[in-house]
């Protein structure tokens, strides 16, 4: 009834997938991507039952993790050591999320166990024409998802145990895909998703991108730095000071918006202090950039709502430039660099380069994040595969006012960037402009599994909507 094949992780060659498809002799095939799987009683039969009921091509399930602190993956010869370690492992619930049209991330978590209908596995493998060294499994599931309403079914039941040897925090693993050591992997993943988008008629070509129409209306300043915040007493002073310290050359000018969403930790006191100092400075030197304080009402806003409040303010400049309340600009020339880039071309969005630091500015691995995977001819497609486009981001305000940010505290910038790059040109700056500071209160510093699942599900939903918009004209 079952054939099981063990893969060494999710990265494997196209040849291996084709070999598995040829060797699978039973109606159903397990693909297992981690060692040391322990089954819950009758779990395999349960997965088969759901597969047969739903007529899915593949099913996957929630599971438990046995966290193995301070250990590395073992070889079969180390079986005795593994048995001793298991006695010290505390099981952790590790639910996964439903698959949807926009679940295009190559790191989508199916868990370590996938049960395939062997005929579906063979059919998808037969359409794998590329010869990837790393993207074989990714290509397989993209091929299987084409022309299928519900190709993969998630079973929300805990059916097995994984031995987890990866002990880094979620915030430390977040940027693995931009590590230069993984560049060859990323190139293949991009090739696979590009072919998939072409097959489902969702591919954007350079011919689909057109310059934005520059508004002739006057703006009070050239650019505005937008700082949304909530309960950032430890970091907001640094952010505001960094923004006000920017230097721009005439005839350009800028101001700074700080949008506070009902902070209760002393953040408002710090803002008022800096606002008073800024007002005094402007009395003696009117050329001093203005600090504009927006105190939100008590309804729900989140980061997206705070951005919307600033960009629709009549004092907002032609370009709206991001600065998170945790972070700082890496030099006093960041705003001028953005202005220069916008002046070079009719961009709707310009994205810079940042470096990871601790709260004191010391560089942290992986260091510089420049997102060089972006290309003018295919970046708008590859953006659907990755979880972000980079930072800091700067937007053309009149266009942004027609789009708006979703009122959410996660993924709001990604949603807007996807919408823009579907139709408008995006400029990139590969010089470091920004310090992304990691500290214990970052929203993604060390997420638990339910939080990561919620975040990933929402970004997949954003991609789903975006895919539907891109497919619709075709």
Image (cartoon, grey):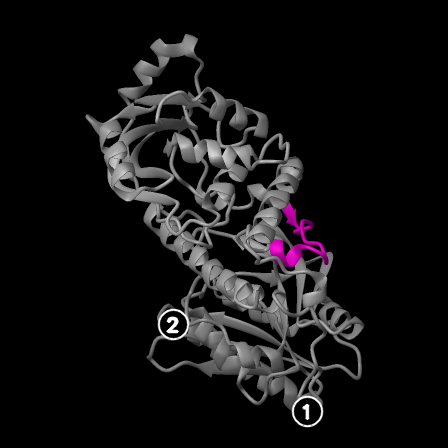
- Which of these two is toward me, 112 or 250? 112
Magenta-span inclusion, residue 451: no
Q: Residues within 10 Å of mark 2 (few under 14, many from 20)?
A: some
Magenta-span inclusion, residue 375: yes
- Which of these two is toward me, 100 or 253? 100
Q: Residues within 10 Å of mark 1 (few under 14, many from 20)?
A: few
Q: Is residue 280 above or below residue 361?
A: below
Q: Is residue 304 visible?
A: yes
Q: What residue is rendered at 72% in x and 69% in y?
A: 338
Image-quadrant location for residue 162? top left
Point out residue 240 in the picture as x, y percentages from the top left corner: 57, 71
What secondary structure is marked by label 1? loop
Q: Earlier in the sequence, mark 1 or mark 2?
A: 1
In the image, which disc is placed on residue 263? 2
Q: Which residue lies most toward the left here?
A: 41
- Which of these two is toward me, 458 or 277? 458
Q: What residue is rendered at 76% in x and 69% in y?
A: 341
Point out residue 334 in the picture as x, y percentages from the top left corner: 70, 66
What secondary structure is marked by label 2? loop
For label 1, the residue is 217
Gap in angstroms between the C-alphas marked 1 and 2: 35 Å
Quadrant into which the C terminus falls: bottom right
* Prevailing secondary structure of the magenta residues: loop
Q: What residue is rendered at 68% in x and 85% in y?
A: 221
């Amino acid at each position: 009834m079952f054939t099981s094949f063990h893969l060494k992780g999710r990265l494997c060659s196209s040849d291996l997938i084709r070999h598995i498809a040829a060797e699978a002799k039973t109606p159903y095939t397990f693909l297992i991507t981690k060692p040391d799987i322990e089954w819950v009683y009758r779990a395999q039969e349960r997965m088969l039952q759901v597969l047969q009921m739903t007529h899915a091509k593949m099913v996957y399930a929630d599971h438990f993790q046995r966290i193995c602190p301070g250990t590395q993956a073992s070889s079969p010869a180390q079986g005795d050591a593994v048995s001793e370690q298991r006695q010290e492992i505390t099981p952790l619930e590790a639910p996964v999320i439903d698959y949807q049209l926009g679940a295009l991330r190559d790191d989508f978590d199916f868990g370590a166990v996938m049960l395939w209908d062997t005929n579906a596995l063979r059919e998808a493998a037969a359409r794998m024409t590329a010869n990837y060294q790393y993207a074989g499994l990714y290509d397989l599931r993209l091929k299987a998802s084409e022309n299928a309403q519900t190709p993969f079914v998630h079973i929300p039941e805990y059916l097995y145990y994984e031995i987890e040897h990866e002990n880094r925090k979620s915030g430390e693993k977040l940027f693995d895909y931009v590590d230069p050591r993984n560049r060859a992997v990323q190139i293949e993943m991009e090739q696979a998703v590009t072919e998939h988008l072409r097959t489902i008629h969702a591919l954007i070509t350079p011919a689909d991108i057109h310059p934005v129409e520059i508004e002739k209306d006057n703006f009070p300043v050239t650019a505005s730095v937008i700082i949304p915040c909530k309960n950032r007493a430890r970091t907001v002073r640094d952010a505001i000071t960094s923004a006000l310290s920017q230097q721009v050359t005439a005839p350009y000018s800028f101001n700074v918006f700080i949008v506070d969403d009902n902070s209760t930790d002393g953040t408002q006191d710090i803002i008022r202090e800096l606002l008073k100092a800024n007002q005094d400075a402007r009395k003696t030197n009117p050329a001093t950039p203005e600090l504009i304080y927006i105190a939100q009402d008590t309804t729900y806003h989140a980061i997206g709502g705070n951005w919307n409040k600033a960009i629709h303010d009549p004092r907002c400049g032609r370009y709206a430039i991001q600065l998170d309340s945790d972070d700082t600009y890496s030099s006093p020339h960041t705003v001028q660099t953005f202005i220069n880039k916008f002046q070079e071309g009719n961009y709707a969005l310009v994205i810079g380069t940042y470096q990871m630091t601790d709260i004191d500015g010391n560089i942290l691995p992986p260091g510089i994040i420049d997102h060089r995977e972006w290309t003018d001819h295919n970046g708008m497609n590859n953006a659907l595969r990755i979880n972000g486009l980079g930072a800091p981001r700067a937007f053309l305000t009149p266009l942004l006012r027609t789009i708006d940010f979703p009122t959410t505290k996660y993924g709001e910038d990604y949603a807007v960037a996807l919408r823009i790059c579907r139709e408008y040109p995006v400029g990139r700056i590969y010089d470091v402009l920004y310090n992304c500071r990691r500290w214990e209160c970052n929203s993604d510093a060390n997420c638990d599994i339910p939080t990561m699942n919620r975040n990933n599900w929402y970004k997949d939903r954003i991609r789903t909507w975006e895919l539907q918009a891109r497919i619709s004209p075709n």
